[in-house]
């Protein structure tokens, strides 16, 4: 399988929950709002024998009138229409921003016109409920009842080679994926396992729905991954996008 990290770059996020681009060379973190967190955003493309998979969709920012995720695909020789499956871990705004786009006539359309989008039914319902400020309804309400969407209920498998599991760790209905082909295993833990450094250091993050569970899962996956020679993908780690045992 071929893995292509699609780095959207670094951003700061403060109490307003807005993502503001951050350039490591030109910008000074001290000059951002007090309490700003630095975060890197990086969806992945995984090319298998059967599919072109997109793992989460990024922030949905537009540069020079073109969606950044489309530019990143193009730079790797892939057209948006070639993506066959979009696998969504959860719908927080830094993962769901690239689900849909707005056409010049003002109409909303899915960003990947030929893909099936997969997500947990409970995650969509929770995001749409408006209870939680980490979700931006307008990013994903298009998914409700859309013919290109498959709503998943709990754990399962797709086409016999992609398995998904609901962890309810980083967010209430967060899911993770394993992609297995030709003796290889790719593991995408999304925000349950967002950075390489977090796999090795034990800590409970305040921003997680169940931080202790996240920590325990990271520990478990890291040892299973070592035993079974997985490749890990890290959504919030531009310096170490992947790690292979
Ligand atoms: Zn999240």
Image: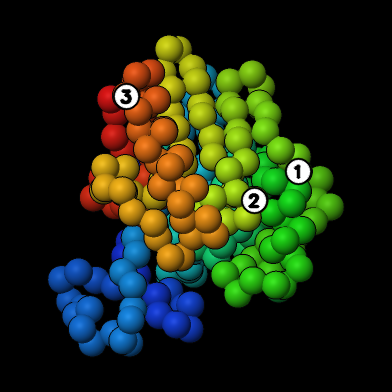
Q: Disc 3 designates what residue?
A: 226
Number of residues whose C-alpha sits closer than 10 Å to that of mark 2, classed few (under 14), some (14–19) or many (20 or more): many
Calculate the distance from the C-alpha at mark 2 to the C-alpha at mark 1: 12 Å
Q: Disc 2 designates what residue?
A: 173
Q: In terms of secondary structure, where does tag 1 sit?
A: strand
Calculate the distance from the C-alpha at mark 3 to the C-alpha at mark 2: 26 Å
Q: In terms of secondary structure, where does tag 2 sit?
A: loop
Q: In the rendered structure, which disc, 1 or 3, sits on the residue that comes first in sequence?
A: 1
Q: Quadrant of residue 31?
A: bottom left
Judging depth in this view, the residue of 121 and 95 nearest the camera is: 121
Tell me what residue is drawn at x 76 percent, y 68 percent: 129
Tell me what residue is drawn at x 72 percent, y 72 percent: 130
Calculate the distance from the C-alpha at mark 1 to the C-alpha at mark 3: 31 Å
Place of residue 245 in the rendered image (x, y in percent of width and height, measured from the top left): 28, 25
Task: Please name which of the two marks, 2 or 1, marks the residue nearer to the observer.
Answer: 2
Q: In the rendered structure, which disc, 3 or 2, sits on the residue that comes first in sequence?
A: 2
Task: Please name which of the two marks, 1 or 3, marks the residue nearer to the observer.
Answer: 3
Place of residue 133 in the rendered image (x, y in percent of width and height, measured from the top left): 60, 75
- The verdict on label 2 being within 8 Å of ligand 1 is no
Place of residue 71 in the rendered image (x, y in percent of width and height, measured from the top left): 43, 55
Residue 26 vertical position relative to residue 88 in the rendered view, above or below: below
**Residue 151: mark in rendering:** 1
Tell me what residue is drawn at x 49 percent, y 60 percent: 208
Confirm whether residue 75 shows in the render: no
Residue 120 vertical position relative to residue 205 in the rendered view, above or below: above
Task: Find the residue positioned furthest to the top.
Answer: 183
Q: Quadrant of residue 155?
A: top right
Q: In the rendered structure, which disc, 2 or 1, sits on the residue that comes first in sequence?
A: 1
Number of residues whose C-alpha sits closer than 10 Å to that of mark 1, classed few (under 14), some (14–19) or many (20 or more): some
């Amino acid at each position: 399988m071929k893995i292509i990290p699609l780095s959207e770059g670094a951003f700061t996020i403060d109490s307003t929950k807005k993502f503001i681009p951050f350039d490591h060379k030109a910008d000074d973190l001290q000059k951002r709002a007090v309490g700003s967190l630095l975060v890197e955003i990086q969806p992945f493309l995984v090319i298998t024998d059967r599919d072109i998979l997109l793992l989460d969709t990024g922030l949905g920012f537009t540069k020079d009138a073109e969606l950044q995720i489309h530019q990143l695909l193009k730079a790797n020789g892939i057209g948006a229409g070639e993506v066959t499956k979009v696998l969504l871990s959860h719908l927080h705004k830094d993962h769901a921003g690239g689900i849909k786009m707005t056409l010049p006539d003002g109409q909303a359309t899915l960003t990947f016109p030929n893909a099936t989008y997969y997500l947990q039914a409970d995650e969509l319902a929770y995001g749409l409920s408006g209870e939680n400020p980490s979700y931006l309804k307008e990013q994903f309400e298009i998914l409700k009842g859309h013919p290109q969407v498959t709503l998943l209920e709990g754990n399962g498998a797709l086409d016999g080679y992609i398995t998904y599991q609901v962890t309810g760790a980083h967010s209430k209905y967060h899911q993770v994926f394993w992609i297995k082909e030709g003796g290889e295993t790719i593991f995408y833990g999304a925000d349950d396992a967002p950075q390489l450094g977090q796999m090795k250091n034990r800590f409970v993050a305040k921003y997680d729905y169940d931080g202790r569970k996240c920590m325990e899962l990271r520990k478990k996956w890291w040892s299973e991954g070592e035993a079974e020679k997985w490749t890990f993908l890290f959504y919030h780690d531009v310096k170490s996008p992947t790690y292979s045992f």
